[in-house]
Image (cartoon, rainbow, N blue to C red):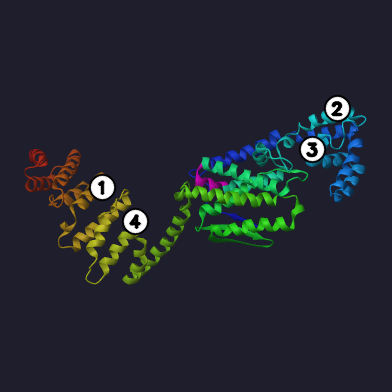
Amino acid sequence: MLIVPLHRRLTLACFPWMTLALVIANVFVFFVLQAGDDRARAVALDQYVETGLGDEEFPVYREWLATHERGELNAVFDELAGSAPQHAAMLLQSDAPFLAALESGAIVPDSSEGRDDWRARRTAFDMQWQRIFTERWLLRFDRLEVPRLVSATFLHGGTGHLLGNMIFLAVLGLLVEGALGSWRFLVLYLLGGIGASLASLAWNWGTAGGALGASGAIAALMGAYCMLWGTRRVRFFWWFFVVFDYVRAPAIVLLPFWLGWELLNLAFYRGAGIGFEAHAGGIASGALLALGMRALGWERRDFMDEDVRADEARLDALDMARAREHLGRLEIVQARSLLEPMLSRRAQDPDLLVMLYRCARCEAGRPRLHVAALAVFGIDARGAEAIAAQRKVYEDYAGLCTDPRRIPAALRLGLARRWLQHDDVADALRLLQGIDLQAANGERFAGEVLGLVQMAYARGERDSLRPVLETLVGRAPESTEAGKARVLLTECMLG
């Protein structure tokens, strides 16, 4: 069963740099540090056979297998010893408990004849064997060595093993690193890998062999992903034998599927040579680590909520299109029922507010016209298109309303400022004529009006300034701004 979350595009803004660094580290370890392992292993095994170590150790190993209730390996070992002694030596060398007993002298006593010669040949072979980089750093099931808990997660057994892991690391890294940030993601990856290694060690303790691969740490990203996204609905691809689909569901739903699949395989395919126990341990470790990070408030909710916002925007666009159709048929109630629920999340959307103004304009008696117009005027419009929409609504409202001065002074000032910034000087000055400077904090309004007048004056405007300057002088005669206005008014008259 394959389940892959695919709901975020790769962009420079969300590029997972730490994930890329981990991919590069894994590739470097495999293609550079592990590159000479095959040759070093072949040389060591040839040395084992040529020095006659097998003649002395193979019989001892057969007896060991029989006395330690592992007789099922005897037939395999006997066949290898007869036809491929290097492979038989490889099997013997992978049996850590046997090697530990061999090293301690429990199998070949110190008093044995020829022990010194055997020891010299075994020491030389061990030195050659230690030249294999993978052997020095993979996870051994007979010992707990903390460095190996981490180092094993950067080793791979082949190009296919590496490629598969790196694809999943890239896909999950984009999502989990984006949700946590680079350094917290790295901490989770390393600790999750340690958790996976500990699970593998506990499950296989005392058996022959070892483990390697990044899949345990990647499984930790799977568990963390489910906890971080939680009940957010995500898109993912799933494939089971010949059935596949691309669906949406809460991220937390993936956790029992991922963990259950690994536990099911662990129960029925223990001899498959795949670290299902490491995968299960990694998923559990990652989930617990992510829960802790969420409790500390370390997740980046803006990143994770982008999907929610994108879905809302898509649904809102559909509702806006339907509302336009209703408006075209003068079905005001239906249009308003689609538009008003969007206000809580799109309170500054010019298109939405203009459409609500159109609804108010078409209603019988227009009871909501004034409120709808003020909502449009209150938009902090920046672009030319939004400002043009505000102007169009203002012109329409001024034509319908008997007293457009009902627009609060603060809104009139904001509109005038934006229009001036876009070189619409004449319309901006008309907004300022007759403005009620005493509506609230008249001193502030007077100062802002004077500032806008000075902007218009600096752009060469003269005649249109007089009504505004007269308003300043007449409504705030004792203010500092009135004195400056008198100077500008004189200059306008002289000019």
Q: Are the two marked residues, 4 and 2, in contact with CB atoms closer than 8 angstroms?
A: no
Residue 395 at what x, y percent from top left? 22, 58
- Per the rendering, the mark at residue 349 is 4
Above or below, 252 relative to 292: below
Q: Nearer the viewer, mark 3 or mark 2?
A: 3
Residue 331 at what x, y percent from top left? 33, 72
Find residue 374 and report its image quarter. Answer: bottom left
Please name the residue that numbered disc 3 is placed on. 100
Tell me, yes or no, if residue 330 can be seen here.
no
Q: Nearer the viewer, mark 3 or mark 4?
A: 3
Residue found 53% across the figure and 45% down from its top: 177
Please name the residue that numbered disc 2 is placed on. 120
Looking at the picture, tell me which residue is in the foreground, 224 or 422: 224
Find residue 359 and report its image quarter. Answer: bottom left
Q: Mark 1 vs mark 3: which is more N-terminal?
A: 3
Position of the C terminus, as image quadrant, is top left
Label 3 SS: helix
Q: Mark 1 vs mark 2: which is more N-terminal?
A: 2
Q: Cα distance, mark 3 to mark 2? A: 17 Å
Q: Cα distance, mark 4 to mark 2? A: 83 Å
Q: Amino acid at mark 1?
A: Arg
What are the residue bounds of the magenta stretch? Answer: 173-181
